[in-house]
Amino acid sequence: MPRMTSEQIRDRVRAYFQASLNKTLELSLELPADPMIDVANEIAMLKEYVQDLRGKLASQRYQSPAPAEAEELLSSLDKSPPKTDVDAFRLAANGIMRAKIDNARILTAMLAGDYGSTIPLGCWRYDHVGGA
């Protein structure tokens, strides 16, 4: 498999992020309507999850399933075994962790009714330092 460029990796991470946002929107509509869900508890757990992910991202300890998702993101469409280099893997895993963080942050805001905080962070623009 030819080496994937940073731009191609970022494009795939952005697609992953968009798919995650779609699921986040569904959850934001379903969770409050479920009488078995304690929304305040969900918000508290999401905040803890984001804090945990941020710490792992800062130390580059990528949480499962991010490593497997990074390998999948880097694999070719013909499903041959991926031959990834360390830099490509780190870029993909970093992007996936950032997507998980931003999605959890957005879901937290939606569940709290803080729709002013549901805009994705600037990291999803290509001109942002750090890419993906």
Image: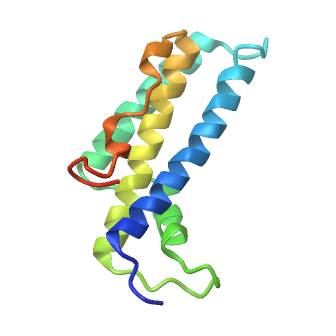
Snapshot quadrant of residue 107: top right
Q: Is residue 113 visible?
A: yes
Residue 91 sits above or below residue 83 on the image? above
Q: Nearer the viewer, residue 51 or 73?
A: 73
Residue 29 sits above or below residue 65 on the image? above
Q: Is residue 62 visible?
A: no
Q: Residue at x 48, y 90 (%)?
A: 1
Looking at the picture, how far across and down is residue 20, in whole percent?
58, 43
Looking at the picture, how far across and down is residue 75, in whole percent?
53, 77
Q: Nearer the viewer, residue 39 or 28?
A: 28
Left/right of residue 122 with respect to residue 112 in the rendered view: left
Q: Residue at x 45, y 33 (%)?
A: 49
Q: Residue at x 50, y 14 (%)?
A: 115
Outermost residue to the front: 127
Left/right of residue 39 with respect to residue 14 in the rendered view: right
Q: Nearer the viewer, residue 127 or 111?
A: 127
Coloring scheme used? rainbow
Snapshot quadrant of residue 85: bottom left
Q: Residue at x 42, y 19 (%)?
A: 117
Outermost residue to the left: 129
Left/right of residue 67 with respect to residue 94 in the rendered view: right
Looking at the picture, how far across and down is residue 30, in whole percent?
74, 23
Looking at the picture, how far across and down is residue 7, in whole percent?
36, 66
Left/right of residue 54 with respect to residue 118 in the rendered view: left
So how many labels did they put on this image?
0
Snapshot quadrant of residue 123: top left
